[in-house]
Amino acid sequence: MPKLSEFFGISIYVYYRDHAPPHFHAISGDREVWIGVTDLAILRGGLGPRATGLVLEWASKHQDELADAWTRARNHERPDPIEPLR
């Protein structure tokens, strides 16, 4: 499970050969959320409101990179890291 980015205590991952729809995982502490790449919809789980807002802000700036990371991971290739939120 390659880590794509990390910021403000939140880690962003994609998993090799994960199931559709394209999504990424954001983990903060013991909480996790799955977020769709194309529509940034929450698919499963949840973080606190502030962490969720930070993840969605970051993802909206990096949707093309997330789509590429998803494709690479599905093909069992290592995706490139993505710039963290600053």
Image (cartoon, rainbow, N blue to C red):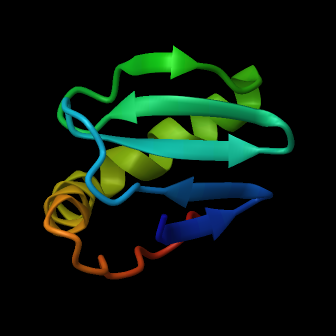
**Is 38 left or right of 61, judged from the image as shown?**
left
Name which residue lies at 44% across and 19% down: 42
Frontmost residue, 10 versus 44: 44
At x 65%, y 58%, the residue is 11
Residue 84 sits above or below residue 21 on the image: below
* Place of residue 63 in the rendered image (x, y in percent of width and height, measured from the top left): 24, 51
Q: Is residue 72 at least partly visible in the picture?
A: yes
Q: In the visual, does 12 lie left or right of 16?
A: right
39 in relation to 84, above or below: above
Residue at image position (32%, 82%) is: 80
- Taking the view exactly as shown, the residue that stands out farthest to the right is 29
Classify residue 70 by image quadrant.
bottom left
- Residue 36 is situated, as x and y percent measured from the top left of the image, at 30, 31
Residue 86 seen from this side: no
Give the side of residue 28 with respect to residue 6, left or right.
right
Q: Where residue 56 sits in the image (x, y, percent)?
A: 47, 37
Q: Is residue 40 above or below residue 27?
A: above
Q: Position of residue 55 (x, y in %)?
A: 55, 43
In front: 54, or 37? 37
Which quarter of the figure is the C terminus placed in?
bottom right
Instruction: Name which quarter of the figure residue 84 lies in.
Output: bottom right
- Image label count: 0
Q: Residue at x 33, y 54 (%)?
A: 61
